Image (cartoon, grey):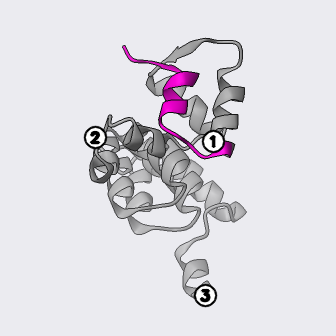
């Protein structure tokens, strides 16, 4: 398993703010293993995981999103923490599972989208959660989207 060190990051020549964030996230550790858990943790702290994967040569730039879309949870995390925006490709991958479709609507789209809605309501639990979030305004319904356009 690949280990990431401060030297690894410095050799990639990141911008100063990302280097400082990495140093704070790394803390007293000399290195961290490159795991899904650590990538998510780093992204939550504001580190640009997409930049790292591209510059470290782990995934070609054009294939990064495609690679993330191989799994609904990874697609959701990629959209949420790396791109920080919805994209048709990540939404489609997240919509392979009612739970990730619901979370995509709530955390990434933050709005009604027919694909996330249709998948989420397939499961009674996520149907109830989705509709509850719509009633509370956290996921605007289709009428609210049409009015705001």
Name the spot of residue 2 as percent of width and height, x first. Answer: 39, 17
Foreground of the two, 71 or 45? 45
Q: Depth-wise, is mark 1 or mark 2 nearer the camera?
A: 1
Give x and y (percent) for residue 4. Answer: 49, 21
| 99 vs 51, nearest the viewer | 51
For residue 5, side relative to residue 16 (left or right): left
Frontmost residue, 11 versus 36:
11
Considering the numbered disc 1 on the image, is that residue within a helix, a strand or a loop?
A: helix
- For label 1, the crowd category at 10 Å Cα-Cα, with few meaning under 14, some 14 to 19 and many 20 or more, is some
Gap in angstroms between the C-alphas marked 1 and 2: 27 Å
* Mark 1 or 3: the one toward you: 1
Q: Image check: 29 left or right of 10?
A: right
Which residue appears at 44% of the width and 60% of the height?
117
Residue 70, labelled with which disc?
2
Quarter of the picture holding the N terminus = top left
The quarter of the picture where the C terminus appears is bottom right
10 in relation to 109, above or below: above
User: At numbered mark 2, what does the secondary structure look like: helix, strand or loop?
Assistant: loop
Is residue 13 found inside the magenta-colored segment of the image?
yes
Q: Earlier in the sequence, mark 3 or mark 2?
A: 2
Q: Is residue 108 visible?
A: yes
The magenta region covers 1-16
Residue at 28% x, 40% y: name it: 70
Tell me the SS state at disc 3: helix
Q: Residue at x 43, y 58 (%)?
A: 116
- CA gap, disc 1 and disc 3: 39 Å
Kindly identify which residue carries mark 3: 147
């Amino acid at each position: 398993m690949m280990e990431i060190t401060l030297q690894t990051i410095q050799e990639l020549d990141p911008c100063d703010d990302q280097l400082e964030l990495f140093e704070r996230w790394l803390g007293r550790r000399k290195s961290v293993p490159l795991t899904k858990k650590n990538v998510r943790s780093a992204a939550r702290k504001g580190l640009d995981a997409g930049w790292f994967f591209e510059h470290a040569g782990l995934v070609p730039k054009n294939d990064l999103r495609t690679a993330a879309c191989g799994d609904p949870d990874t697609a959701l995390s990629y959209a949420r923490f790396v791109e920080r925006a919805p994209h048709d490709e990540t939404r489609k991958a997240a919509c392979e599972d009612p739970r990730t479709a619901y979370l995509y609507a709530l955390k990434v789209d933050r709005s009604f989208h027919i694909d996330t809605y249709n998948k989420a309501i397939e499961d009674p639990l996520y149907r109830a959660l989705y509709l509850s979030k719509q009633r509370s305004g956290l996921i605007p319904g289709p009428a609210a989207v049409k009015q705001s356009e």
